[in-house]
Amino acid sequence: MATAQGVEAQRVEAGNRRIKVKAIAGSCGAEISGVDLRHIDDETFAEIYDAWLEHLVVFFRDQTLTPEEQITFAKRFGEIHHHPFIKGMEDYPDILEIIKEEGDTRAFGETWHTDQMFNPKPAKATILYAKETPDAGGDTMFANMYQAYDTLSEPMKAMIGGVKTWNVGSRKKLSETDKHGSVSEGRYKGNEKMAAKVRDPGELVTEAAHPLVRTHPETKRRALYLGNHAIGLHGFKDAEARPVLDYLKTHAIHPEFICRFRWEVGSMAIWDNRCTMHRALNDYPGKRRRMHRITIAGDTPF
């Protein structure tokens, strides 16, 4: 008969004492099972966090968190960040409810990006929890930006090593004349629920220069740091910057760098914005999708 000490030793030998981790792709992404996120202790969270750093994005199924419980869990990752352009839920401002209705033509986050890259201190992590999902479609794809950097040629790495991108959250502030279309009439046109949440960022800084090659503050690995908010290279002429950015953005989404997650109600994803890009697929016309997102504040990229 196995003793308690023997069972514990087997767990340690297996690498994860309290959770099961199964990679879903060769590039990145792992599904974690054997855990109820409403009831975890510090040791279990430490294992989740280690798996997150290793796999860049982790996924959970069949979770039943209230908004309060999602917020409590999110705070284990750090301080909660509020989106400067979009209001959170009225009762839970820490949570951004992302909705695509049956008649909407646009989906929130449908281009390759990393969250809050236009912020001087971009997001560390994003926690997305599925409340309503279509019967098919609406998957999210993630790209491993460590791999994107590692597979560049040595001359390319040398060329971009000290270069910074210029990142912009919006081409114009809401307080300016809407003669050419406000944010709500531009980026969120085709999605009325998200357009209705748009707010003026006020004095918040929503433009920033960041290293094109970023060092992860915890793993110390180097990664390409890109997204749709990167509109140029800091100090470069547009004609000089455009070919470089176009090449790198195309390179970064090679199929071998990507994992894809199929959402179900109760699924949760947590991704590391410091070493991934992601994209929500808009392939479910006439169907509704509703998600609860919490973003974790980060630090200054280096």
Image (cartoon, rainbow, N blue to C red):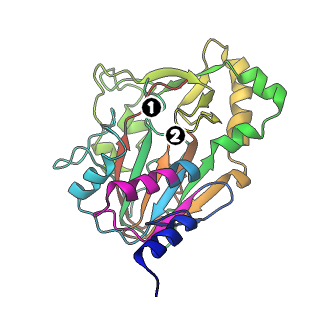
Classify mark 1: residues with Cα within 10 Å, few (<14), some (14-19) or many (20+): many
**Residue 68, image x, y percentages:** 21, 55
Q: Is residue 261 above or below residue 256?
A: below
Q: Nearer the viewer, residue 8 or 80?
A: 8
Q: Is residue 242 left or right of residue 4?
A: right
Q: Considering only order in the chain, which callout, 2 or 1, is on the residue closer to the N terminus?
A: 2
For the point 32% across and 26% down, which residue is it?
174
Task: Describe the element under mark 2 as helix, strand or loop.
Answer: loop
Between 21 and 287, the one lying in front of the other is 21
**Does residue 43 lie above or below 161 as drawn?**
below
Measured Cα–Cα span from mark 1 to mark 2 = 9 Å
| Callout 1: SS | loop
Q: What residue appears at the point 66 percent right and 41 percent down from the top-left corner?
A: 146
**Amino acid type of the residue tagged 1 in the rendering:** Pro
The answer, for residue 157, to whether it is visible in the render is yes
- Residue 224 colored in magenta in the image: no
Q: Nearer the viewer, residue 78 or 110?
A: 78
195 relative to 1, above or below: above
Q: Which mark is residue 114?
A: 2
**Label 2: how many residues lie within 10 Å, few (<14), some (14-19) or many (20+)?**
many
Which residue is disc 1 drawn over?
122
Q: Is residue 43 magenta?
A: yes
Q: Quadrant of the C terminus?
A: top right
Q: Residue at x 57, y 53 (%)?
A: 55
Q: Residue 95 location in percent, x, y?
A: 28, 48
The residue sitting at the left extreme is 91
